Image (spheres, rainbow, N blue to C red):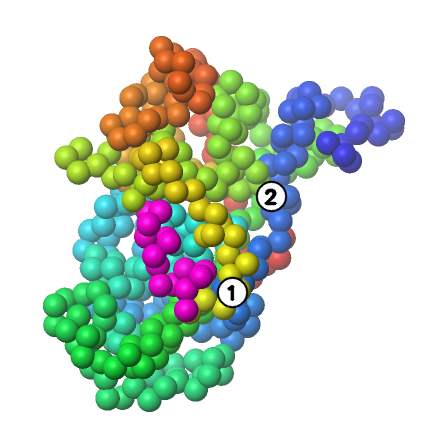
Amino acid sequence: MPGLAEPESDRNVHLRDTWSPADLDVLASLRISQVPPTPKDPSNSVELFPAAVDLGRRLFNDARFSRNHTISCASCHDPEKQFQDGLPVGNGVGEGVRRTMPVVDVAHSPWLFWDGRKDSLWAQALGPLEDAVEHGANRTRYVHLMRTHYRADYEAIFQPMPDLSRIAQDAGPVGTPDEKLAWASMTAKEREDVTRVFANIGKVIAAYEKTLTYGEAPFDRYVEGTIARVPAAQQALTPQEVNGLRIFVGKGQCVSCHTGPLFTDQHFHNTGVPPRDSVNPDHGRATAIDKAQKDEFNCLGPFSDAKPDQCQELRFITTDKTSMDGAFKTPSLRNVALRPPYMHAGQFASIEQVIAHYINAPTAKVGHSELSQGTSGHSERQPIRLSKQEVYDLASFLRTLSGPILEGAKK
């Protein structure tokens, strides 16, 4: 890797741990300092406005934006719990079916949610607001709340809010039969005006969420020191943790999917995780492809600020549902030790259980697992063979990825 050549003056420095040039290149690519600038979202023209960030922060924490006035975005994406809730499945006004994903450094992902059914952070923010078991309210109620409590803040960012004082308090395209009927009775112009304000709610929440990033962890200090050939810096990790790191980038094959400085390839994989509901198993990405394409809030939709040629991910979305059956998004491993349980529905309580799953490589109940059972020639991975000590070491390494969460900081 360019820039990692050993200086002449450093060749006699004794390091506790030595790495091959190829492995050192991999380690260098995983440093938090290598996270690229957060990509601009062409579908959200206000994402960098300080006023939008401030308003988004307040909406993120406002429990009035729910059916029972007790659930805010922060209820499930709790800043004190790594911007998630620590539960196997989300619990808003009702119980969900999937684990709450953290909203830290997610602006780097082209697809949001475990199944990737949303293609932007602002579109993702809107989903829970109308979901019956998350916030559970409806589109017109949110607009009335904005008009009553945040009108001046809204109009400082967007155009003047339309006069919607005559529309029903509770109406929307999803919700109760009465809410749907009230929505259908509105004029097309009223529905469009309401939906535009609703979309803008998502855009300011996204502006705030985009400021949340991961900070430096012991792993990063270890790698930076190793590259700089500073012996003392290698004390950031214990020998056991270093052995776990060697397993992570080597025989454990973890880096195949958990790659880059955020430890995720941002793709979808079926690894045979047992479904939470064996009678009605979750098909993951396979059922989300159509949702993403038909979403009124996607990059090509009428409420997007992007031009069609700026929507490459959506335009060229993989539509092979068979290959995506049972596939879920690769989560970042940054701070992973601080947010059990694990997998898309909290199937495993500990990191050690997750590692055991990858070693056992069970046959997928839905679709085809990429993991190898050691008997099939059709798996994308080689069998993973680890001793108990190696499992311990690998889990120990993963705990070195824990660092602070930063708000508004630039890396």
Secondary element under disc 2, as helix, strand or loop, is: helix
Image: 57 above or below 272: below
> Left of 34 or right of it: where is 161?
left
Res. 260 image quadrant: top right
Q: Nearer the viewer, residue 243 or 327?
A: 327
Residue 328 placement: quadrant: top left
Residue 409 visible within the image: yes
In the rendered image, residue 1, in percent from the top left (x then y), is placed at 73, 31
The magenta region covers: 288-302
The residue positioned 56% from the left and 68% from the top of the image is 48
**Structural distance between the alpha carbons of marks 2 and 1:** 29 Å
Give the number of the disc on residue 378: none
User: What amino acid is labelled 1 in the image?
Assistant: Ala
What element does badge 1 sit on? loop
Percent of width and height locating residue 257: 48, 32
Q: Which residue is mark 1?
A: 306
